[in-house]
Structure formats: C-alpha cells, structure tokens
Amino acid sequence: MNKRNNPPAGVLGIGIEAFLPPGSYVPDRSRPGRAPSFVEKSLAVAAKWYAGVAGAVQASQPGLLLSSLRQRGDWSGRWYKRSATGLKYLARAACMPLRHGRFLSFVDEYASMRVYRQRDPRLLERHMHRFVNAHWHRRQRLDYLNQHYRFALTHLPSGLFDLVYALGHASLGSLTAKDGSLLTLCMRPPIFKGCEGELCLQLCDGNEDPLYSIVFTVSDRDASIMIGCLQGPRGKNAKEVVRELTRMMHGMRPKQLMLSLVYAFARYYGITRLLAISNDAHPLRHTGRPLHSDYDAFWQEQHGTLAEDGWYALPPAQNHKSEAEVASHHRSAFRRREALRRQAEQLLINALEQPVLRLPEHRPQALRATAGRPSPEYRAEASWVS
C-alpha cells in the first residue's frame, strides 16, 4: 500500500524536526520571549541581504545594476581594492533596492544623463556616501539627488546642461575689473567625488582658473535651494588674494557676489526658500579635514536663522543698501559695485533664458570624446574643502 507523500519541511506546519532523528531536541520558536540564537540571526541577515540584491536587480530592470559596475573610473587601486569597492556598492544598493533601482532607470532614461554618468560614474552612488548634509539619511540623499536632476532636465537649457554636466564647464561671460582685467563667470558640475552639492557657480580669472565657488542643490518638489559650499582661494596668500580681488571689484566682497548669483538663480525660477549648511551639519565636518570657512558667522551676517537639521534659513530676498544710505564720498564706488553685481546677475540670467530642449538620442555621441573621465582640474582639486 502506497504511503501518502509528506510535504517538505516548513510547509503545512511541518518544521525542521521532521528531518531529525527521533528524540532530538528542537527549540520551540513559537514560545514567546525566546531570544533568537546567533545562527538564526546570521541566517536572517543573510536572507535579507540576498533578498535585497535580488530586489535591486529586479527593480533596476535587467542589466542596469550590472551595467552600473562597468566603466567605474572612480574606483581606484589594485583589482582587489576595486572588487571590494564594488561589493560595498552592491551591499549598499541592497539596502534600498527599489529606490536605487528607480534612480538607475532614471539615469538611463535620458541621453544627457547617460553621457554625464560616463563622465562622472560617482553619480550612481553619490547618495551612498556623505552628501550635502551630515544629518541626512541615505533615503533623503537619494531623494534630493533625484529631485535636483529632474529640475535640471526640466528647467536648464539643453545646451547649458550639456556644457555643465557632459563637458564639465560652461563659461557665462566676463566682467571688467577695476584695473581693466577680466573676471569670468563659469558654471560647473560637482568636483570629482564631491559631496557638497550638484551645481557650482564660479568666479574665475581671465584664464578661467577658479577664484571663488558656491555649490548648491535644487529641490524641485520643495522649491528650495540648499547651499552646501562657499569657498575662496586657499594657501598662504589666500587673504592677500581675497583682499586684492575685493579691491578689483570696487570694494565688493567676492562671497557676497557669489551669494547674489544664487539669489538671482532662485529669483529667475521663482524659488523663495533658501537654505545654507551650518558648520555642524557640513558633510566634511567629522572627517578630520579642516574647514577653512566659518559658515555660521556668514549666514548670520546675511540675517539667516538656524533651522532644523543643521540648516540656516536665509531671507527670501537680499537686502541691498540704497544709494541714499551710503555716505556721499563713497557713492561713486557704490554705484560701480552695484553695476558690477547687476552685470554678473545678468550674465547668469542670459544663460538661463535659452530654450529648454532635451537632447535627441543620437546627439550625445558627439560629446563622448570628453565624457569618459572627469576633467583634470576636478581630479586635482578632489580634496578641496570649504
């Protein structure tokens, strides 16, 4: 007489005891208050990690997660170091498989983003490291990263987007300094392995070597701008360079001009919420690297108020002096300063007023000659801090 087939262990109430010899002790997992053993914890963690990797592969569509392992110029060192970095990347992706998979699909959806990803592969895992605000969770980092590029694709002119993110540099025009020399305004992407924001405005000399930079990220959903970096020159002669630059700008401080440019950017897009990072929340604050700027003091000088999560909330508009408030013997310099500031803001607005059109699929091929690696100046300045 044939015996009835038994279901496998774990099905219909049959557990692992079905495979043990008679009389073997099996702990009662249903007993309340029993702490799981070390082996059970380890198996649960391994199962969760495996499920996360499987979910990441499924969420990112076939091949996207695997393709994100290729052309990783940001992974340096010998083969075993690069392999270890790749495993860390996969483990971090497994912690948020659906969100990371959607971000990979978003990058792959736009030709402009694919070209930028080739130029800066770190884009794919920027949210897995410290980014903009030290208090952010990785989900917040990915959310704001995604929002910034949705804003950039929707609002930045396609030609400007290509120059900034695909080629790494967009010259906005020149200003004439007091001595007749030229100062250039530039827009650039984040530096190689940067963590302070996704769009950089720079005041450069006539050779387009950076003198002052301000880096920020735009939140499309919250209609806000988050400033993560305001940096001047470094080195032994930094104070002399700033002093001379201030004199060449008719007494206007360079960092004041950089903040005015961000306000002009916000005003053009109707953004009234401006946030600036505090000293404590800066992503490089707890890395052992020195910060060469006191952000808190400058934001307080700009009438910013300390808000939650380490942000300073700046006023929705800058408060500029009128000519009547300036002493009569300083009004000539005041008018030249204001003319220089308005000219710089207009250069930025002119760049933003071009048509907003996304690249067709075939056009990025013309940009691939320079899209394979970061620009040399960004790699050389990868250790800069604010």
Image: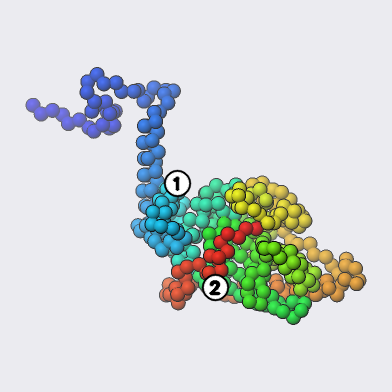
Name the residue located 40 percent from the left edge and 33 percent from the top edge: 41
Using residue 204 as the reference point, say whether residue 10 is left or right of it: left
Name the residue located 76 percent from the left edge and 67 percent from the top edge: 243
Q: Is residue 110 above or below residue 101?
A: below
Where does label 1 land, which residue? 95
Work out which quarter of the rendered image holds the C terminus and state it: bottom right
Q: Kindly give the residue lying farthest to the top in the view shown.
A: 23
Disc 2, SS = helix
Inspect the image, locate mark 2, and give the three-letter code of the amino acid beneath it.
Answer: Leu
Using residue 281 as the reference point, say whether residue 372 is left or right of it: left
Q: Could you say which disc has been placed on residue 346 in the image?
A: none
Q: Residues within 10 Å of mark 2 (few under 14, many from 20)?
A: some
Residue 223 in picture, x, y percent from top left:
62, 58
Q: Is residue 179 above or below residue 303?
A: below
Q: Could you say which disc has been placed on residue 163 in the image?
A: 2
> Looking at the image, do the residues carrying marks 2 and 1 touch, with CB atoms under 8 Å apart?
no
Residue 217 in picture, x, y percent from top left:
60, 59
Using residue 244 as the reference point, say whether residue 90 is left or right of it: left
Return the residue nearer the eye: 55 or 87: 87
